Image (cartoon, rainbow, N blue to C red):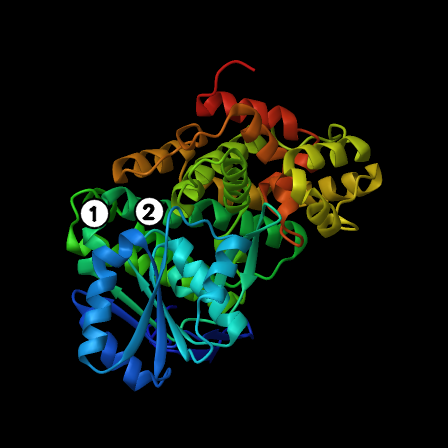
């Protein structure tokens, strides 16, 4: 079902699901040594005469200076903007980038990991400038998407922006980075496992749009990026493993582009990730890489599903949170960002018993379908093993997330988004959210309650 188009080119087609699927990326280049063609791609892509290269201090030395030299030799004006110190994608970093981009700039080149990529895409879209994206490590699928995560008022916000004009994924550059960074890419791929389960539940319970061809594309992402050969090859910088990981992550981006949002590739594990990053920022700790956190979130999410399926769906659910207690918990968990979260969930969060019972009836009606899909999904133990083999964290404990922060994430991380349905909403409907949060915390290796 995936051979209808050349997925590596900009394309669109009418699917059997009766929708038009599109991949609007400008141009995708993957392979050993492709970065040497950057000057040619800038000229051929007609992105402009004057560019700014955005990088951090480490990447400018690793490969940025090489890019500046090759562009200069080709007569291309590309000015460096090097961000000093640990870079966090927040309002301050956005301001630093905007204030240091000359007014006559025609395009941006972002070179680095997820943070630099997110900043470059966000600023480029805001200023109406095309962006050339150069990943320095294959840590996530965001290099190929139109999404950026920017922290505003201490809360991670996902923005849908412009697709990159060109992506230059040079596997020789990617192979030079520390192996734990590419291992994070395996975490991103594994996240599609639990995301797919949540997406299926959203379709069955909430009639959220589902497309078999997109599901097949996300499956091909997992097959390429989390195979035994890929997982075991990452730690030894095997060229084919890196190429397959890159291909898998690109396929994830294609699937999300076809869908028109990240629903098919982003479930509860991504919401847990956003909450955990917020906790790290609040403490002043270094952020975990996105792929690391969603990989650990996948293991936690699959454990949540284990608990749902083990007990079955009851005739009568447990009690919902008291609205006042819930609001107090949101304010405690989100601090300065609580007002934004509460405004987002106004009218979306319903606490009435009648609504809860209606939701439970829908769950019970599709219980067999949910169980069948759950039984076809790799287990938390299997996914955790693959993450460890690749060199990626498999639990939030390894990310420095405390037991209380983990429990809070299970209770409140879902409030970061409206219109998403996943395991976190299911356990609230069942009246078992806190119980399951504590049980999963025990399974993840946290100490006594």
Q: Secondary structure at mark 2?
A: helix
On the image, which quarter does residue 46 sit in?
Answer: bottom left
Within the image, what quadrant is residue 255 found in? bottom left
Residue 130, relative to residue 141: is it above or below?
below
Looking at the image, residue 396 sits to the left or right of residue 8; the answer is right
Front-most of residues 220 and 346: 346
- Is any atom of residue 173 visible in this view? yes
> How many numbered marks are there?
2
Disc 2 crowd, CA 10 A, few/some/many (<14, 14-19, 20+): many
**Label 1: element kind:** helix
Q: Which mark is residue 229?
A: 1
Nearer the observer, 28 or 318: 28
Q: From the viewer's perspective, is the residue at label 2 or at label 1 nearer?
A: 2
Residue 186 tag number: 2
Cα distance in 3D space between marks 2 and 1: 12 Å
The residue shown at (71%, 30%) is 431
Point 64% across, 34% down: residue: 333
Q: Residues within 10 Å of mark 1 (few under 14, many from 20)?
A: some
Residue at the spot 78% in from the left edge and 49% down from the top edge: 346
Please, which residue is most extreme toward the top here?
448
Where does the image place residue 84, in percent across and percent down from the top left? 37, 52
Above or below: residue 15 compared with residue 303: below
Q: Position of residue 192 (x, y in %)?
A: 43, 50
Residue 192: which disc? none
Residue 213 visible in image: no
Q: Nearer the viewer, residue 395 or 62?
A: 62
């Amino acid at each position: 079902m995936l051979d209808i188009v050349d997925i590596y080119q900009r394309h669109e087609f009418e699917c059997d699901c009766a929708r038009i699927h599109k991949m609007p990326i400008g141009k995708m280049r993957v392979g050993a040594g492709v970065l040497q063609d950057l000057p040619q791609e800038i000229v051929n892509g007609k992105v402009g005469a004057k560019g700014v290269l955005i990088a951090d201090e480490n990447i400018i030395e690793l490969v940025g200076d090489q890019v500046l030299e090759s562009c200069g030799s080709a007569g291309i004006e590309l000015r460096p903007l090097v961000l000093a110190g640990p870079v966090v994608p927040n309002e301050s970093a956005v301001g630093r980038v905007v204030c240091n981009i000359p007014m006559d700039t025609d395009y941006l080149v972002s070179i680095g990991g997820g943070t630099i990529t997110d900043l470059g895409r966000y600023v480029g879209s805001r200023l109406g400038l095309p962006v050339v994206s150069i990943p320095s490590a294959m840590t996530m699928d965001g290099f190929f998407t139109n999404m950026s995560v920017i922290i505003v008022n201490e809360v991670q916000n996902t923005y849908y922006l412009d697709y990159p004009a060109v992506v230059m994924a040079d596997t020789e550059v990617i192979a030079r980075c520390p192996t734990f960074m590419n291992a994070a890419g395996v975490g991103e791929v594994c996240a599609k496992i639990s995301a797919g389960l949540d997406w299926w539940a959203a379709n069955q319970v909430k009639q959220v749009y589902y497309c078999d061809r997109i599901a097949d594309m996300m499956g091909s992402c997992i097959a390429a990026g989390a195979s035994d050969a890929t997982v075991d090859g990452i730690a030894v910088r095997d060229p084919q493993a890196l190429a397959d990981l890159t291909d898998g992550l690109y396929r994830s981006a294609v699937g999300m582009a076809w869908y028109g949002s990240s629903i098919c590739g982003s479930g509860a594990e991504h919401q847990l990730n956003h909450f955990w990053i917020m906790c790290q920022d609040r403490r002043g700790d270094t952020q975990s890489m996105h792929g690391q956190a969603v990989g650990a979130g996948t293991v936690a999410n699959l454990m949540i599903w284990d608990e749902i399926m083990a007990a079955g769906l009851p005739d009568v659910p447990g009690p919902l949170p008291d609205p006042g207690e819930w609001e107090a918990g949101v304010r405690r968990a989100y601090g300065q960002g609580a007002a934004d979260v509460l405004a987002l969930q106004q009218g979306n969060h319903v606490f009435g018993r009648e609504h809860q019972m209606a939701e439970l009836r829908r769950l019970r009606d599709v219980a067999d379908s949910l169980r069948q899909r759950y039984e076809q999904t790799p287990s938390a133990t299997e996914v955790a093993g693959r993450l460890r083999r690749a060199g990626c964290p498999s639990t939030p404990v390894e990310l420095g997330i405390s037991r209380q922060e983990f429990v809070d994430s299970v209770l409140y991380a879902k409030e970061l988004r409206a219109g998403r349905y996943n395991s976190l909403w299911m356990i609230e409907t069942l009246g078992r959210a806190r119980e399951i949060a504590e049980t999963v915390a025990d399974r993840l290796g946290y100490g006594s309650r």
